Image (cartoon, helix red, strand yellow):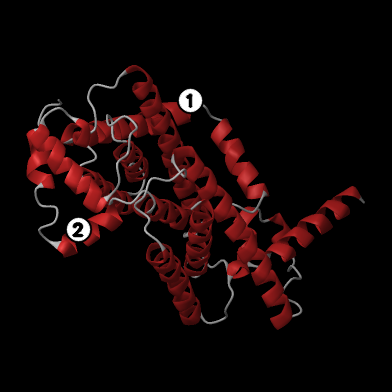
Amino acid sequence: MSLDYFILVFLSSLGVYQIVAIPAKLDGLCFFKHPIIQYIFGILAIIGAFGWFYTSSDRNIHTSVEGSQQLGLFLGSIIASYVFTAVLASIMQAKVNSKGGIPREGKQYDMGIETLKKTTLFGGIMSSLRKERKDKV
Amino acid sequence: MPPLAGWTLTVTGFVGKSPALDHVMRLLVNDFFIPLVICLILLVLWLGYSDRTKRDRVQRIVMNAAVAIGISALVVKLINNFVNPWPRPFLVNDSVIRESARRAAETIFYFPHDPTFPSNGATIAFAAATGVWLGHRKAGAILYALATLWAVARFYAGVHFFVDVVGGAAIGILTALFISKIFMPRVEPFPTWVMKLCRLLYLA
């Protein structure tokens, strides 16, 4: 049950990331260039995850996944899904556009997910490392 | 027996009369469905704003709600350690209520054996809803609706008395008010440090 719950959260949060990346303009999390395809992918991921979870087995049974364990699994799963999304988007965007990971001037001053508006996760990390090196010199 | 225990008999009496309603309730009462939907809504709020200032503000609200969920769960644990005023509806001495609740729980859910008062689900769901509602009315209203559905489903399934879910909701609301209005402003700069750490890790 724990693994099933982890997969449910992983897939549904993957869908959520794809959907929210559009209004939040977080291009660094996008798998697709077209927002409509991305919306459809996100919705299908959420519906698919819930559909699979609730049709594959009876979920109204007494399980060991309770309270704090459920919270821990949820947090672990959404972070894993976020890292997976950011890494996959970095790879996909690097393939589509070889300049995609190269940060533009000035973006190194952005922090956190704000960075993902202009570049991918890899791009953001590279930008931070470059800035650190530059500051040391 | 708690006050208004007779209401359990009325509500659980509907179980088995409408298979469609029972199917819906089986989903709503589930341990994972509504909690996960609530958490996914919190995730949408966390990431869903393009404007940096607005996103920072909403992320603070989500953090308050998350802390309220955790603290309210602890409050329930504490209460359970000292108070266990009555058994689950399907374990009470009154045979009419017991059998009706037993049939409902068997059909809709399962037989949980942890303390019934206060309802854990109602507590955390209302804590999340109140935490969000204080800063984001629309999302808060949606979360209140989900919390109410979850509480009603638990009551319908015969695993809680009406007083359990109302008590849980009250504890959740009061805890969230305390966390958002008193606790979090007083523990600054810890919340700011957490936000900075999240930003450093590209999580906020």
Amino acid type shown at disc 2: Asp
Rendered location of residue B200, percent (x, y)? 67, 48
Q: Which chain does the residue under circle 2 lie in?
A: B
Q: Nearer the viewer, residue A137 or B170?
A: B170
Q: Nearer the viewer, residue B127 or B48?
A: B127
Q: Earlier in the sequence, mark 2 or mark 1?
A: 2
10 Å crowding of disc 2: few (<14), some (14-19), many (20+) = many
Q: Is residue B124 placed above or below A128 in the rendered structure?
A: above
Q: Which chain does the residue under circle 1 lie in?
A: B
Rendered location of residue A59, percent (x, y)? 38, 55
Image mark for residue B22: 2
Element type where label 2 sits in the image: helix
How many labels sit on residues?
A: 2
Q: Nearer the viewer, residue B4 or B192?
A: B4
Do labels 2 and 1 touch, CB within 8 Å?
A: no
Is label 2 or label 1 in front?
Answer: 2
Residue pointed to by mark 1: B186
